[in-house]
Structure formats: C-alpha cells, structure tokens
Amino acid sequence: QEEVKSLNAELEARKAAEAKKAEIRKAVAAGQGKVVAKAEEQKVETRNSKEYIDAYAEYIRTGKADECRALLTVNAPNNGSIPVPEFLQEYIETAWEQNDILRRVRKTFFRGNYKVPFELSATGAVVHPEGTTAVTEETLTFGLVTMLPESVKKLVSFSNELEDLRGEEFLRYIYDEMAFRVAEKLADLILDDITGSPASSDSDEVGVPQVTMAPAILTIPTALAYLSENARDPVIIMNRLTEVEFLSAYAAGNFAVDPFAGLTRVYDNHLPAYSAASGGAAYAIVGDLVGAQVNYPVGDNIAFTYDNISRKKEDIVEILGRQYAAHDVTRPGCLANLLKPSAVTT
C-alpha cells in the first residue's frame, strides 16, 4: 500500500508538470514570452551547382574567394583552399586518364622530396650440406632514387572579349587547354626519364636495359627478354611512323610472326620516328610503365594565377596553370629501350 501511494504521488507530479508545459506552449503560441534567437536557415550548395560553378569562375578571374566560401558554408575546407567544382574535378581526372602514359605509371601523394629505395644487387641462396661450415651471410646492396618535385606550367592568354564568357563555358575552356597540356608535358618528362636512364643501375638511378636493333620480327621479343617478372603488363611505346617500320618487317616475313609479340601499342610522338632518329638514340620503349612513378606533393589539381594587369594595355588577360610533381624511374626490370643502330662506316 505504501508503494502504491508513492507511485500515485509520482504519477500526479508528472501530470502536473506536463500540464504546466502545455500551458507554456499555449502561451508561446499566443505570442507571449521573449524571443531569444531566431533559427537561421543555412543554404548549403554542392560543388556541382550552377551557383558554385559561376562563383568559382569569378574566383579564377578575380582571385576573390569570399563568394565560394559563402556558398560552401559548413563544407568549406579549413586549410584555406577552394575545392574545384565537381564537374571540373572529374574533368581533370579524365585528362590524366586519357593520357596513355600517365594512366599507366604509379602515382603517389607524399609531401616534399620523396626517396624510393631499390635493390641494386644481392647474393643468391646456397646449398648447405650437413656438418659443413656456416653459410655466408647474404650481401644486399640498395640504391636510392630521390624524386625532386618541379613545377610544370602552362600560360594561357586571351582577350577581354573571351573573358566575358562566364561560368561553365569559361572554366571548361581554361581547364581543357591547361589540363591537356600539363598532362602531355608530364608524359614527355616521364619518357625522357626512361630513355635517359643508364643501361644498368647505380646507387641513385634505376637502370633501363638497352637493345640496339632495327625494327624486325625479333626486336620486341628480344627487348621483352630483358624484363623481370615485375613487368606484368608490358606495352610498346613508339611514334606512329615507327609502327610502319615494324609492319614492313611483318610483311617481309610473309606475315608469319607478329612483330609486336601481342603487346598493346601506345603511341607518343615525343619519341622520334625510327627513320628520323640518330644512331644510338632511343626510338621505342618496351615494358610496364609501373616502373615509372609520379609523386604529387600538394595534390594533382592545377593551381591558377590570374593576371589582368601586366598586359592591360593590350586588353589581354593571362592565367598561369601550375602542376607540382616529381617523376622518375623507380622499379628495375620493368622497362627496356630500343636504340637505333649506328650507321656502318665503310
């Protein structure tokens, strides 16, 4: 009975408290009470909205980021950078992926100088007969490739009339030109890394074997023989005019053997055509491009500098696109260079 009395008292107290709350709510609804603060509606725009794209275009033109930050509200980054609109982010990635060289190399995003160790030499295993002296300890020698980042830049100038193309059209023009050219230059630098590598590794460079042969049926299979098991997806990289030389050898052999050994052909005219290459120069590359690496210390987005002052008398606006990246050959046994034989002196 005492417990029932206690429960009944608690129930009555709760009823009284709820009745008081109901009276307060009714009074507030009738306009009584004091307004402490109004709830403000926050407008959050995603990066693919038209408003943000237009604001970002103005940011590129003027360098003023206030409108971009206002549209992003709580999604704005704390590091002071302005993220590109979503369609532009995809557009830049597509530019990398559409380049046959860049989409095959290894990509990393380590800040600062990046050092990559590789095995320079190692002694093999031995048979240890029972009861004999202990085996000799393995000797391992490592090399170290130091990847130093550098700026790849593209300058675009245009008239004030073109600048009047606001929003998405303006941005697509800028990104189309700069993303393509920067990707193209990076690919050229990677090919230069490969063709400029020594024939064998040393303490600070990964070696790329050199095969001195003219385009023939056995040229590419010979280059493949110099690769290790690390080359899992080899291709042949060459100028389109060089392909004609291999096809000529194919026809001369009565089409009996594929001169490309079934490899995917990647075309890049940064490499000289076989007919135009000098003796001893690399005219093609055989191997897996995973042996080359690009490191982006500050990300793979392009940074812009807008200048409408330097050439204002000409009504010219300049935008400088900059990509900060390091590149080098970092894996041995993945690549081989094909060199043109030197002319025989008679």
Image: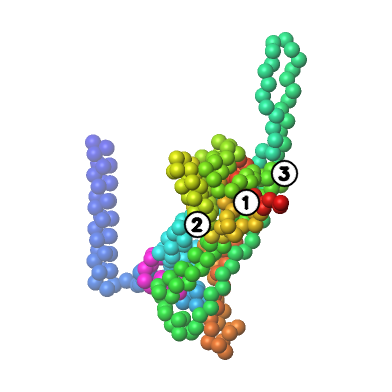
Q: Residue at x 60, y 83 (%)?
A: 310
Give how far across and how far down residue 152 sits, in percent.
Answer: 60, 64
Say what amino acid the circle numbered 2 marks.
Arg
Q: Residue at x 41, y 70 (%)?
A: 52
Q: Is residue 12 above or below residue 81?
A: above
Give how far across and how far down residue 88 sits, in percent.
Answer: 43, 65
Mark 1, secondary structure of its residue: loop
Q: Residue at x 68, y 45 (%)?
A: 199
Give how far across and how far down residue 213 sits, in percent.
Answer: 61, 46
Viewer-closest of 42 and 316: 316
* Disc on the earlier residue, 3 or 2: 3
> How is the protein colored in the picture?
rainbow
Which of discs 1 and 3 lies nearer the camera? The answer is: 1
Mark 3, secondary structure of its residue: loop
Say what amino acid the circle numbered 1 marks.
Lys
Viewer-closest of 264 and 15: 264
Which of discs 2 and 1 lies nearer the camera? The answer is: 1
Q: Is residue 298 above or below residue 224?
A: below
Query: Which residue is at the far front?
Result: 346
Residue bearing mark 1? 340
Q: In the drawing, does residue 155 fall left or right of residue 172? A: right
Give how far across and how far down residue 283 sits, in percent.
Answer: 59, 53
Viewer-closest of 203 and 321: 203
On the question of residue 30 being in view, the answer is yes
Residue bearing mark 3? 202
Q: In the drawing, does residue 120 fall left or right of residue 43? A: right
Q: Which residues are magenta?
A: 44-57
Callout 2: few (<14), some (14-19), or many (20+) C-alpha neighbours within 10 Å? some
Q: Which mark is residue 240?
A: 2
Q: CA distance from mark 1 to mark 3?
A: 24 Å
Say what amino acid the circle numbered 3 marks.
Asp
Query: Which residue is at the far right?
Result: 133
